[in-house]
Image (cartoon, rainbow, N blue to C red):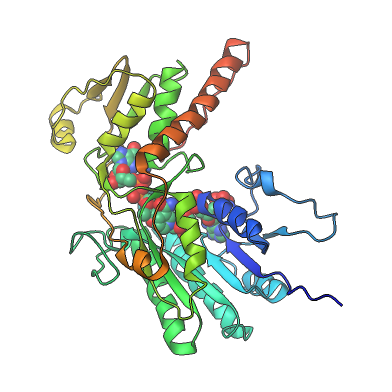
Amino acid sequence: MNTQSPKKKALITGVTGQDGSYLAEFLLEKGYEVHGIKRRSSTFNTQRVDHIYEDPHVERQNFKLHYGDLADSSNLTRILAEVRPDEVYNLGAQSHVAVSFEAPEYTADVDALGTLRLLESIRFLGLEKTTRFYQASTSELYGLVQEIPQKETTPFHPRSPYAVAKLYAYWITVNYREAYGLYACNGILFNHESPRRGETFVTRKITRGLCNIAQGVDKCLYMGNMDSLRDWGHAKDYVRMQWMMLQQEQPEDFVIATGKQYSVREFITWTAAELGLVLRFEGQGVDEKAYVAQKVGDKAPALKVGDCVVAVDPRYFRPAEVETLLGDPAKAKARLGWVPEISAQQMCAEMVAEDLKLARRHAFLCAHGHDLAMPRDLAA
Ligand code: NDP
Ligand code: GDR
């Protein structure tokens, strides 16, 4: 007789993203059967989960991918009906704040209505008493901050189409909890990064950019608002907390943050120090917006980091900026015993080490006759 209890099943939207990949690893280690939704793409988009890929031809596959999209309700309903997960982690999103100003309707469709589609499918299938739901909420909800530091009770004031869409997702999650008794939680996560961070988010843009410059494969790093202040943690610490939230008796919302705040300029300084670049800011202390307004012409004003140039490019200023975010994780610590284990500086060092390997490989291949273009993105 088999006395083993069946494996728990988790479904992750956004499994190919930074958090999805760490969460999938974490849940597999905990013995879960992990299902992930991936989008159809004309090029491979599974780099972050390739190392945990399991051949579908073997028996007892523990990691399974399904094609899908948060814009497609029938697809979500079919996957939920097929998997009948114990836990759903809704991490899928158009997650770039600056891009949300360019594509506000799409961002609302995926980030706001996508969450509703998932919740409604759970209800439609009668899973609301058995399936637990995690919503990837964000510190961007605080936007124009009303209180320092920000905690679960701090009022919201979103400042971008992304944040407004996530505000809907936050409240619809609360609503399904209150209306239908669904076990649903919002994790209000502050910025978290890693070597797997998308290349167009500021930390990764800096580590990648300066590593490339240090290896001679790039010349200049163009930045937006370097005075912006963020509370940066490590994605590995944060996915642990996503799982912890779904293991409580009662569903609740939690702020996840480190309680420490640094500027984008400081992150540049740490990265330069890791690489042994002598840091020399020209124009230190200037308000870059005013500086750009004065000097803008066809020449971008430049701040120098040793031999490499960090230039301000106004295209990276946002129509409405979130200037400062600082979280108070006291509730997570008191109720769940969660504390972040990796500091922002340690994380920066890890990111630099990984990006240096990539930059060296690129430089090596170029030096040996390969005509390789550096991948670029409008948002970076
Ligand atoms: P990423 O941008 O790295 O990953 C986003 C994931 O969502 C990717 O797998 C992406 O697929 C997928 N996705 C995008 N659009 C759709 C769609 N239409 N249908 C289905 N899947 C889609 O984000 P992170 O891993 O950093 O963040 C995870 C979640 O947490 C997001 O919801 C984000 O908004 C939120 N969040 C993130 C924070 C952070 O600091 N990282 C802080 C607070 C909240 P593909 O790979 O094909 O692009
Ligand atoms: P954010 O992250 O908008 O906080 O959203 P991002 O790393 O993009 O920006 C952080 C701050 O840095 C400033 N900045 C720049 N940002 C980018 N991307 N590129 C630049 O060149 C640049 N120069 C300065 C920004 O103006 C901003 O103030 C992230 C995402 O992961 C969201 O999905 C998530 O919800 C929040 O974190 C919490």
For residue 193, side relative to residue 316 (left or right): right
Residue name at image x 45 percent, y 35 percent: 351
Exactly how many numbered labels are in the figure? 0
Task: Please identify the quadrant where the N terminus is shown.
Answer: bottom right
Residue name at image x 50 percent, y 58 percent: 240
Q: Nearer the viewer, residue 210 or 253?
A: 253
Q: Nearer the viewer, residue 268 or 95?
A: 268
* Residue 276 drawn at (x, y percent): 36, 19
Q: Can residue 7 be seen here?
A: yes
Using the image, determine if residue 252 lies above or below residue 106: below
* Residue 104 drawn at (x, y percent): 39, 58
Q: Nearer the viewer, residue 24 or 72?
A: 24
For residue 103, side relative to residue 322 (left or right): right
Task: Please identify the quadrant where the C terminus is shown.
Answer: top left
For residue 348, side relative to residue 63 (left or right): left
Q: Can residue 93 be seen here?
A: no
In the rendered image, the residue lying farthest to the top is 368
Residue name at image x 51 percent, y 83 percent: 182
Using the image, determine if residue 44 lies above or below residue 313: below
* Residue 322 drawn at (x, y percent): 25, 52
* Residue 38 drawn at (x, y percent): 63, 56
For residue 189, side relative to residue 240 (left or right): left
